[in-house]
Image (spheres, rainbow, N blue to C red):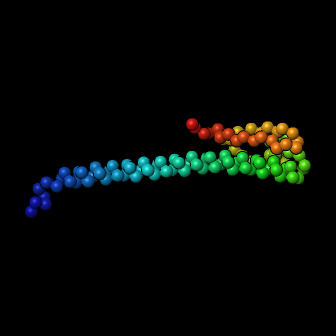
Amino acid sequence: MNRFTGKHTGNFIRTLILSGIFCLFVTAAFWSAFSEAARSAKAQEAANLKNAVKNDIIHCYAVEGAYPESLAYIEEHYGLTYDSSRFLIDYEPVAKNIMPDVTVIDLEEKE
């Protein structure tokens, strides 16, 4: 007969508070995992772009016998495309028979 007297209200509130804390904890864990995955994907995109540029440079050398003189040459003759608003490619040719230095910088990267 004590079911309706209200003595169990403290247990209900405690359970509700613990459930809310648990939900916040799970949400924070998912948010953290999602943020780390996004960060990792951005780093992988920069690495993939650098590999694409190097592959085009090597392909140009194999076909033409000399390394390309500029990044624009690779874009025009070998079909390199990338998001120039997001990435900056520093292309420094040394000589026709020495592989150029290539650096890919992610402009959206926040440190």
Which image quarter: residue 2? bottom left
In this image, 14 relative to 98: left or right?
Answer: left
**Residue extending farthest left:** 1
In this image, 64 relative to 71: left or right?
Answer: right
100 lies above or below 22: above
Can I make out residue 43 in this image? yes
Q: Position of residue 20 (x, y in %)?
A: 32, 50
In this image, 4 relative to 78: left or right?
Answer: left
Query: Where does the N terminus fall, quadrant-wise?
Result: bottom left
Depth check: 108 or 43 in front? 43
Residue at the image position 64 percent from the left and 38 percent from the top: 107
Residue at the image position 58 percent from the left and 37 percent from the top: 110
Q: Position of residue 73 (x, y in %)?
A: 84, 43
Q: Position of residue 87 (x, y in %)?
A: 68, 41
Query: Where does the C terminus fall, quadrant-wise?
Result: top right
Q: Position of residue 61 (x, y in %)?
A: 86, 49
**Residue extending farthest front:** 98
**Residue extending farthest bottom:** 1
Which image quarter: residue 71? top right
Residue at the image position 90 percent from the left and 50 percent from the top: 64
44 lies above or below 3: above
Can I make out residue 72 in this image? no
In this image, 45 relative to 67: left or right?
Answer: left
Residue at the image position 77 percent from the left and 40 percent from the top: 101
107 lies above or below 78: above
Task: Tell how many labels.
Answer: 0
**Residue extending farthest right:** 65
Depth check: 76 or 55 in front? 55
